Image (cartoon, helix red, strand yellow):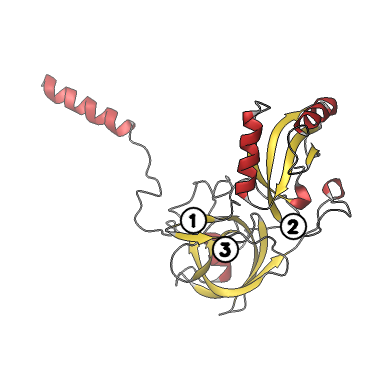
């Protein structure tokens, strides 16, 4: 009797400590149970956003294939096959570190900068929606884009799984606080930077920038102010670099000099101070 009781207790403890199923325990993606009415799900509202520090590494490899992120979404128009993804990935992190919500209008794309706003047209029925790209994929078959489950419902192809779509990027202008000067590039191009430190006082940032200039002569050293915080934050960065390899080399140089805590980041040239 005592042995039986012990076994019951062990089974109960094991059940309580079992992690909930993840996307890796689900062999195939699927829709949630029940009916979901997407009529009241709002479209993504296009607005200017800086390029995400995550999800924009270029080039990158998946399943042995190499992909390069487009330098800009300007004038991007393409037609191809769209699929959708749902319950298997719901609640998981997207490529830029956000949480995937299959009930919102988002998308995964292999090469567009993250984030990008897209107008998506289902060429089979003419339905249109606006989505926000915050993830990478799809990485199998000839599919051009993966839409959220709610987006698939809005476009009317959730039951068949795929459809032919037209994608059109929606360009937005940056606010005045992060607008670039006439001497900088006007397109939203990605580049690598080495961030060395961040300070609450400009004087400390300027002092560090001056020290860096004594041994860095291969790139511009500048002080970037963050405008989107309650208090200004002055970040000391070196760049831009056209390749990650160049940035890594300079980062190592700064480490060898034991200056700051250098890291490599990817930013739009329009928002290098963000």
Circle nearer the N terminus (2, 1): 1
Q: Nearer the viewer, mark 3 or mark 1?
A: 1
Q: Image point 65% across, 54% down: which residue?
A: 115
Q: Image point 66% across, 64% down: which residue?
A: 118
Crowdedness near tag 1: few (<14), some (14–19) or many (≥20) residues, C-alpha within 10 Å: few
Residue receiving disc 2: 188
Residue receiving disc 1: 61
Q: Nearer the viewer, residue 255 or 174?
A: 255
Report x, y in % for residue 85.
Answer: 48, 60
Q: Is residue 19 above or below residue 109?
A: above
Q: Nearer the viewer, residue 205 or 165?
A: 205
Report x, y in % for residue 152.
Answer: 54, 66
Instruction: Name the secondary structure under disc 1.
Output: strand
Q: Nearer the viewer, residue 34 or 217?
A: 217
Q: Is residue 37 above or below residue 7?
A: below
Instruction: Tell me how far mark 2 sits from mark 3, CA to CA.
Output: 27 Å
Circle nearer the N terminus (3, 1): 1
Circle nearer the N terminus (2, 3): 3
In the rendered structure, find residue 151 and report the number of the disc placed on it: 3
Q: Residue furthest right?
A: 182
């Amino acid at each position: 009797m005592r042995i039986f009781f012990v076994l019951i207790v062990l089974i109960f403890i094991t059940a309580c400590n079992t992690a909930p199923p993840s996307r890796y325990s689900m062999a195939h993606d699927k829709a949630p149970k029940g009916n979901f009415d997407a009529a009241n799900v709002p479209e993504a509202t296009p607005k200017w956003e800086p390029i995400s520090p995550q999800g924009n590494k270029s080039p990158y490899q998946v399943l042995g294939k190499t992909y390069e992120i487009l330098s800009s979404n300007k004038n991007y128009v393409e037609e191809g096959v769209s699929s959708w993804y749902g319950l298997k990935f719901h609640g998981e992190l997207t490529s830029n570190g956000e949480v995937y919500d299959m009930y919102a209008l988002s998308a995964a794309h292999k090469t567009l900068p993250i984030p990008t706003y897209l107008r998506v047209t289902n060429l089979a029925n003419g339905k249109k929606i606006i989505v926000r790209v915050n993830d990478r994929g799809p990485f199998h078959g000839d599919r051009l884009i993966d839409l959220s489950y709610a987006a698939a419902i809005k476009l009317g192809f959730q039951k068949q799984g795929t459809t032919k779509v037209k994608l059109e990027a929606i360009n937005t202008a940056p606010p005045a606080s992060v607008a670039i000067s006439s001497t900088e590039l006007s397109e939203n191009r990605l580049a690598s930077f080495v961030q060395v430190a961040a300070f609450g006082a400009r004087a400390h940032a300027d002092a560090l920038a001056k020290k860096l200039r004594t041994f860095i002569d291969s790139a511009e050293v500048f002080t970037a102010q963050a405008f989107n915080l309650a208090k200004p934050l002055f970040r000391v960065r070196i760049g831009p670099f056209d390749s990650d390899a160049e940035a890594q080399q300079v980062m190592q140089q700064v480490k060898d000099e034991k200056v700051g805590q250098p890291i490599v980041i990817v930013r739009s040239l329009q928002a290098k101070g963000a």
